[in-house]
Amino acid sequence: MANVFMPCIMRGVLESRVIASVILKRAFGMKRGTHSLSLTNRYYISQATDHIRNITRCRNFHNGPSLFSGEYEMQDPKSPDKVVNVVFVDKDGVRHDIKGKIGDNVLYLAHRYGIELEGACEASLACTTCHVYVDEDDLDKLPEPHEEEEDLLDLAPSLQENSRLGCQVILTKDLDGIVLTLPKTTRNFYVDGHVPQPH
């Protein structure tokens, strides 16, 4: 079973860590000595596999060197048709027009351009410091949040109907022109004054 996921792990696909959470908590949550999977566990493995395929297809991975979290976002688009324009509105209300690309993770893209979107847990779905407000016109273009993201958003300060975690927003061409606003406050996992640095 692990062989199914190893090629994707080697390519850095698991950076969102949602998949890792699903695999560890649900698929491999069997008792020691159990040799067969329940239908529920088979369902979760199927869901995780589909998610991996979607990310792989979106990012156009091929047999090349491995990429670590955030490295993909440090690369420029290969062609103009891969460009996805993003507008970040920071805590002071200043707009930052950024050129991203298909497959970029919003958290790491923000880090690349010095936008103060913390991401204390490095996209492992363990905090809410990459909390953003998605413009109402763009909200329906995003996939529904996973249960883990919804649970964390319930803990986010200044929660709104259009709240999402930036680490769970992967750019597609449909999101060209997306406007993401940073909330005035976050629950900071680092010491006050910490500024996230690109990896």
Image: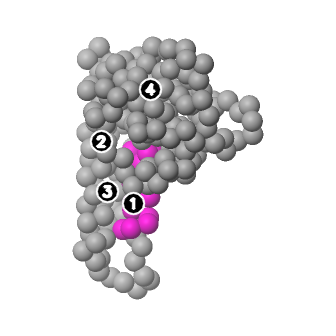
- What span is in magenta? 12-27
Residue 18 percent across, percent down from the top left: 42, 52
* Vertical relation: 190 (above or below) 75: below
Q: Residue at x 28, y 77 (%)?
A: 38
Which amino acid, by three-letter code, is at mark 2? Pro
- The residue that disc 3 covers is 48
Where's the C terminus, which quadrant? Answer: top right
Q: Which mark is residue 22?
A: 1
Residue 91 occupies quadrant: top right
Residue 185 occupies quadrant: top right
Q: Which mark is residue 180?
A: 4
Which amino acid, by three-letter code, is at mark 1? Val
Q: Residue at x 41, y 16 (%)?
A: 99
- The residue that disc 2 covers is 143
Q: Earlier in the sequence, mark 2 or mark 3?
A: 3
Real-space Cα distance between discs 4 and 1?
27 Å
* Element carrying mark 4: strand
| Residue 76 in sight here | no
Which amino acid, by three-letter code, is at mark 4? Leu
Real-space Cα distance between discs 1 and 2?
17 Å
